Image (tube, coloured by chain):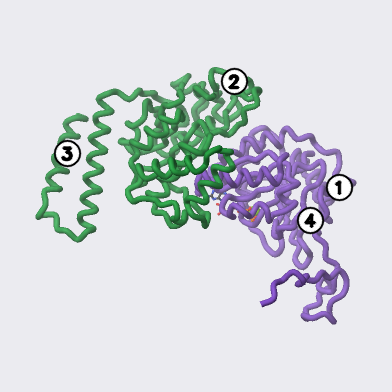
Chain colours: A purple, B green
């Protein structure tokens, strides 16, 4: 099975881009399954279901969606296998700039849009720098000049990635994404594969439900701001 | 150097062979793509942009300098060489025109950026109604100014050999001059439009129907004349608009007469 991870900032066009790509795969006679990981709510399942494919949803609720995601990869794999899928698309929530969803052996696509601003790629971190493919959407509403500078920023941060322009509205560019998916070798099993970059950590009292502000209430992995370099007024 | 792009015909929406089986576009030429909504304009552009090699739904194949995409890209030339200017596009960056252009020039490794930026601004101001200054903020430019700057930038800084101009009907820029500038830079210009004046500004036009390339027409000298009339007619209308917006009353002025006589000329010409 080919395991495709689709990560990216919220509302960047992940589902839109994948819907077009999945249609190409369906035309090739490939069975696709889709799973969406989100926090509290998602309407993406409905959109994927309209393609007539099996769809699953995982809501992380009070747990960090990134950790929830990695803890469920094996289960998502087995579910997709049961659906007899040749390709499984796993769309993540992508809520935090420190997300690190890339897994060895899985094709990892980072979807961002040109609207986030030219200096945002630098802030995105491992989600972008460890991706195999960076798909950039919403080029239809941003000037060519800014797109070229933006793409350059992306290439500087991840020189190995293939950068693809995708229009989530009309699907322009989605054929390349389909080709990338088909060129990616299927994975034997996901158990035992490794994350390309460690996930953001937090094992502290707030993880366990603490709500009161203040040092006496903090335990575990707590990191404090270093004000040493701050200017004195 | 990209000298020529050819589109080898594929299939229309009914899986029938499209009427045009080969379309050649040379550097420095403008191709207009016309046809009703849903007739396949976007797909044709998409095929060219993605350098289709029989794999897209239309089965079209793109040749570059008479080479297949595979042969052409083997020489290490990267894909995705289409720059775009459209009515829907905006500048979103909070920066001065000058700062941004120098940033773009840097990305393109241009050796004398100051000279280049001055040139872009000169071209921009040739196209736009109201002048653009180096210190202007990008996001504050008017629609016409922004479009003019986009054309200037695409012509002189962007290195894409193909420029797609999508629906710039009401952009408020000198479109004829814009075409000349892009052609002068040896660009291949693809013009998607519903506007007759723009269609006739091209060297040839392909008419799309039911997903296929249906007719290919070279623009004749007579059509070029009609286009010039149309442009003059549009200028008159915009003068009339300015006039009304200034608070003038039309009946005391002969502008309307002029427009009507221009219009009459145009109608006899095209009949
Ligand atoms: N103009 C434009 N809009 C787009 C494009 N791609 C997506 N959109 C719009 O952006 C919005 C968000 O798209 P989605 O596909 O839902 O984005 P997403 O990344 O899946 O969103 P979440 O899963 O909720 O994080 C929708 O309104 C889309 O229509 C594009 O290329 N151009
Ligand atoms: Mg989504």
Q: Which residue, given by chain and number where applicable, does mark 3 sit on?
A: B262
Residue for point 58% across, 34% down: B80
In the picture, the disc for residue A112 is none
Compare residues B234 and B101 and report the one nearer the observer.
Answer: B101
Residues at marks 4 and 3 on the same chain: no
Residue labelled with disc 4:
A69
Image-based side of B191 in relation to A81, left or right? left
Left or right: residue B120 compared with residue B228: right
- Quadrant position of the N terminus of chain B in the picture: top right
Q: Chain of mark 2?
A: B
Residues at marks 2 and 3, CA–CA distance in whole angstroms:
48 Å
Residue picked out by circle 2: B68
> In the structure shown, which secondary structural element does the residue marked by tag 3 occupy?
helix
Secondary structure beneath dot 2 equals strand
Can you identify the residue that label 1 sits on? A194
Q: Alpha carbon of mark 1 to alpha carbon of mark 3: how far?
A: 73 Å
Question: Within 10 angstroms of label 3, few (less than 14), some, or many (20 or more) residues?
Answer: some
Cα distance, mark 1 to mark 2? 40 Å
Task: Tell me residue A108's x, y (percent).
Answer: 74, 44
Cβ atoms at labels 1 and 2 below 8 Å apart = no
* Mark 4–mark 3 distance (CA, rounded to whole Å): 68 Å
**Residue B13, above or below B37:** above
The correct choice, above or below, for B26 with respect to A232 in the image is: above
Q: Who's the residue at 54% across and 46% down the image?
A: A139
């Amino acid at each position: 099975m080919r395991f495709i991870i689709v990560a990216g900032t919220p509302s960047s066009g992940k589902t839109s881009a994948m819907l077009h790509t999945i249609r190409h795969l369906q035309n090739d006679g490939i069975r696709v399954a889709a799973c969406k990981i989100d926090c509290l709510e998602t309407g993406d399942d409905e959109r994927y279901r309209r393609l007539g494919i099996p769809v699953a949803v995982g809501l992380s609720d009070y747990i960090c969606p990134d950790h929830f995601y990695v803890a469920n990869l094996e289960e998502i794999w087995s579910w997709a296998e049961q659906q007899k899928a040749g390709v499984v698309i796993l769309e993540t929530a992508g809520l935090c700039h420190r997300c690190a969803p890339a897994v060895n052996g899985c094709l990892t696509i980072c979807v961002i849009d040109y609207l986030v601003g030219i200096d945002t790629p630098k802030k995105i971190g491992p989600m972008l720098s460890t991706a195999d493919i960076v798909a950039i959407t919403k080029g239809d509403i941003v000037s060519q000049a800014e797109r070229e500078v933006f793409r350059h920023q992306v290439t500087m941060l991840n020189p190995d990635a293939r950068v693809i322009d995708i229009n989530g509205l009309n699907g322009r560019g989605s054929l390349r994404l389909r080709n990338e998916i088909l060129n990616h070798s299927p994975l034997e099993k996901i158990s035992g594969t490794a994350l390309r970059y460690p996930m953001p950590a937090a094992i502290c009292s707030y993880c366990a439900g603490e709500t009161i502000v203040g040092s006496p209430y903090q335990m575990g992995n707590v990191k404090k701001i270093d004000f040493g370099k701050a200017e004195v007024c | 150097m990209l000298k020529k792009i050819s589109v080898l015909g594929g299939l229309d929406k009914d899986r029938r062979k499209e009427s045009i089986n080969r379309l050649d576009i040379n550097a420095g030429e403008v191709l207009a793509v016309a046809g009703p909504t849903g007739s396949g304009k976007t797909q044709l552009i998409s095929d060219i942009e993605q350098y289709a090699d029989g794999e897209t739904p239309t089965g079209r194949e793109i040749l570059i300098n008479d080479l297949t995409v595979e042969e052409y890209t083997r020489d290490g030339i990267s894909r995705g060489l289409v720059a775009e200017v459209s009515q829907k596009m905006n500048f979103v960056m909070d920066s001065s025109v000058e700062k941004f252009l120098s940033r773009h020039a840097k990305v393109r490794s241009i050796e004398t950026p100051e000279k280049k930026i001055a040139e872009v601004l000169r071209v921009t101001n040739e196209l736009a109604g109201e002048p653009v200054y180096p210190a202007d903020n990008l996001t504050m430019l008017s629609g016409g100014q922004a479009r003019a700057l986009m054309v200037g930038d695409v012509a002189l800084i962007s290195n894409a050999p193909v420029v797609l101009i999508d629906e710039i009907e009401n952009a408020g820029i000198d479109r004829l001059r814009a075409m000349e500038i892009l052609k002068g830079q040896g660009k291949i210009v693809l013009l998607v439009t519903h506007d007759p004046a723009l269609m006739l500004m091209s060297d040839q036009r392909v008419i799309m129907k039911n997903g296929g390339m249906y007719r290919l027409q070279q623009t004749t000298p007579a059509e070029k004349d009609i286009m010039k009339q149309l442009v003059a007619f549009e200028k008159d209308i915009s003068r009339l608009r300015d006039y009304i917006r200034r608070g003038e009353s039309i009946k005391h002025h002969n502008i309307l007469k002029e427009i009507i006589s221009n219009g009459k000329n145009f109608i006899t010409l095209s009949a």
